Amino acid sequence: MHDEFLCHVTGYGTCEGRRIGVPLGTYRAPTLALALWWLRDRASWIAERLDPSPEDPAFPPGALVPVADTVADVPALLRSWCADDGQQDLVAEQLAEGRLVRIAAGDDTTEYELLAESVDALRMQRTVPPLVVPVA
């Protein structure tokens, strides 16, 4: 069992034709439970910022408009991942085995990536391929 986990969240976009990553947070979790909690918390945090409630008094009436149906609904994908117990169990199992886990969701302009891995696995220069969990 791996005891400590390094977690990151990054937003990726394109600038002048190059893919640019912007770090949105890092957490060194002392337990598996806290690593999973942090990943869900950050996914929810991103979803709320991309898709706030129109009733929020911080936004004037009409300031928020729906996007086209052809645009990927990143907030819904992230919220769905957070609520999916099967996905949470899969991530927990993979992290406990020392594998790198990547959760990613993106639309036409931005990709949001959540990564987590065991600190022990980093030290051992992991030899197992990463688990990529699609949310779409």
Image (spheres, rainbow, N blue to C red):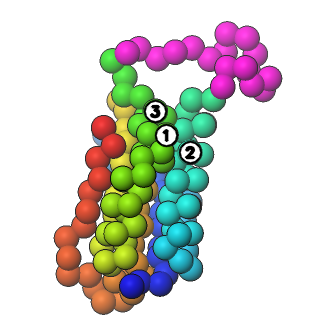
Quick one: label 2 or label 1, which is nearer the N terminus?
A: 2
Which kind of residue does numbered mark 2 sit on?
A: Ser
| Residue 75 x %, y % | 49, 35
Residue behind mark 2: 44
Residue linked to disc 1: 79
Quarter the N terminus occupies: bottom left
Check whether the beta carbons of the residues at disc 3 and disc 1 lie within 8 A of each other. yes
Answer with left or right where residue 48 lies relative to residue 105.
right
Which of the image's four quarters has the C terminus?
A: top left
Label 3 CA crowd tier, 10 Å (few <14, some 14–19, many 20+): some
Check residue 56 for magenta coloring.
yes
**Is 74 on the left-hand or right-hand side of 19?**
right
Q: Which mark is first along the chain, 3 or 2?
A: 2
**Residue identifier under label 3:** 76
Residue 110 picture location, percent across and down: 41, 38
Q: What range is drawn magenta here?
A: 53-69
Q: Is residue 14 above or below residue 57?
A: below
- Residue 104 among those drawn in magenta: no
Residue shown at 32%/69% (left/top)?
94
Residue at 56% across, 69% down = 34
